[in-house]
Image (spheres, coloured by chain):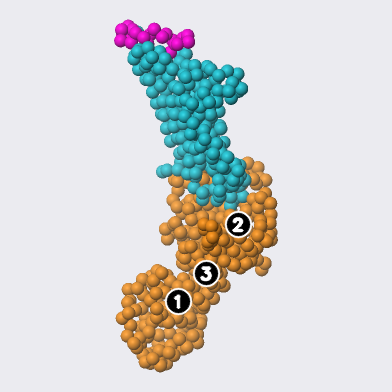
Amino acid sequence: MTEFIAKTMPNVLRLGWGGDSGWGTAIWQTIYMTFWPAIFGGLLGLIFGVILVVAKPGGIMENHFWFSFSDKLVSLFRAIPFIILLAFIAPFTQLLVGTQIGTTAALVPLSLGVFPFYARQVQVALESVDSGKVEAALALGATNSDIIFDVYLREARSELVRVSTVTLISLVGLTAMAGAIGAGGLGNTAIAYGYNRFNNDVTLVATLLVLLLVIIIQLVGDALAKRLNHQDR
Amino acid sequence: MADIISLDHLSVTFPQGKETSIKAVDDITLHVAKGDIFGVVGYSGAGKSTLVRTINLLQKPSSGTVKVVGKTLFADGQTAISKKELQTTRRQIGMIFQHFNLLNENTVLDNVMFALKHSPLSDEEVEQKSLKLLDLVGLKDKADNYPVQLSGGEQQRVAIARALANDPEILISDEATSALDPRNTNQILDLLKDLNQKLGLTIVLITHEMDAVKRVANKIAVMQNGRIVEQGKLLDVYLRPKTKLARQFVGGSLAAIETLRAFDLGKLGPDEELFQVVFSAQTVTKSVILDLYKQLGVDVSMLYGNIEVLGSQPVGTMFILVKGTPAQLQQVPELLKGGHVEVTKIDDRGIWND
């Protein structure tokens, strides 16, 4: 096997497993850059998604200021192309994590890049909860937090898993661009060690590895969404 | 008996664009006494739903007063109690809906327990009480099922159990049987009547199906264009409907309408007239048709006849075609009105067509 790879894809082996340019390092960096922004950006997106639904006109906690503030913030961040966002918020990144380059520095723009996308997805998922259920809960004397947690988030949980899967996959895509600020990862391997050096075998393997990661996320997401869904017979 | 629900001079206005607005509820005064099953009927868009939603302030009125279980919820153009008090009060007012509105990601048992989230009972007591409620609606064995695994009628029973969880004094039914088949409809209605008798539950039933109201209600209000055009005891409104709309609803069972449609009124000769006759079968023992023949000498044929039980009273509806001279025909209503009989001359096809 190793012999076959050495013969057909010599550059893939030359990169090795560890070290700055190694495959293991790149895989780890991609997972690292997917995981933490998923947590931070996910939380932020969830909070803003909930605000967009409860504070909207006619929502259970109707509030014009919070609704239009969230709405505009989300729209604004969605409008900035990620590669520009990386550079644009560099001073903020410096302030937050003490550096502008490297894998950890990439967590800040990745989180900010993914949250507006996720917030919109969460908004749509929560809007899909029948307003009649909210009304029924109100009629039962439910509090606002009951309605957010027990009605909106719980009723939409399968849909939330589904949109989270989509978001995670697009986050994996964003990590490929983080190479621009020296964050490494499989995307960087494909460009810096593959494309730029005419090592097509490296590009191919890096692509396949990203694809594998995406497929795993999709399969786990689909299975979970199905398990959590009791809406359809 | 004291009124458990008092709505006074209530209006609900929805703004439509900048200058126009729609008055969904227009200066309505409605009082429901404890133990009533109060039916509110009217066609879609009459404002029934909007009206009953003001009882628990799911719909905020524009003006008027809402008093429920002795508390003033709304007066002088604003909500009269705090949000917290409103939540507590709402637990005393159960509500069921056309589309059940159960939480699909919760089991049947959890759906009922959700209603008891803020009750002072311990977790175990909450579960026991929820199971007892499910037993009351005949669904104890489905406690661990999810709502989608149940039929529509069963889902509505769960919704009833959930609505009753906090021992409310009032149950609002918003078209609760409209999405069910006739058998389930009757079962749900009978269950409501049973709850009314056993628990003394006051029920406000809104529906566009007159049959539902006839089956269980003791009082009725007929709504049109945001106003109550007629209200009173069911039997009174049924026997002596004052408005055209009430007559339509009372006599307007589908079978009757179909019969009339099939019988083309355009074919009526100059010496023929059609009457709707509604009578309480307990007070009318004489034969209407024979009386007409004997006393006026007119020809009478019956096109449609039906006897229904309102609450526990049998009430009959007939459509009769009378043939005679103009002088004879003129005497028909007078003769019939002598007994407990309500007569309507049907001369305008239009009223049956909507």
Provide the residue designation for mark 3. Answer: B222
Label 2 secondary element: loop
The CA span between labels 1 and 3 is 20 Å
User: Which percent across, then down, holds residue A172?
Assistant: 45, 25
Which residue is label 2 attached to? B60
Mark 2 against mark 3, which lies toward the viewer?
2
Instruction: Return the chain for callout 3.
Output: B
Question: Is B42 colored magenta in this rendering?
Answer: no
Q: Which residues are magenta?
A: A3-23
Going from N to C along the chain, the mark reached first, 1 or 3, is 3
Q: Nearer the viewer, residue A112 or A133?
A: A112
| Chain ID for cyan | A
- Residue ID for mark 1: B316
Foreground: B165 or B326?
B326
Distance from label 2 to label 3 (Cα)?
22 Å
In the rendered structure, which disc, 2 or 3, sits on the residue that comes first in sequence?
A: 2
Label 3 CA crowd tier, 10 Å (few <14, some 14–19, many 20+)? many
Residue A224 location, quadrant: top left
Up/down of B224 relative to B173, above or below: below
What is the drawing colour of chain B?
orange
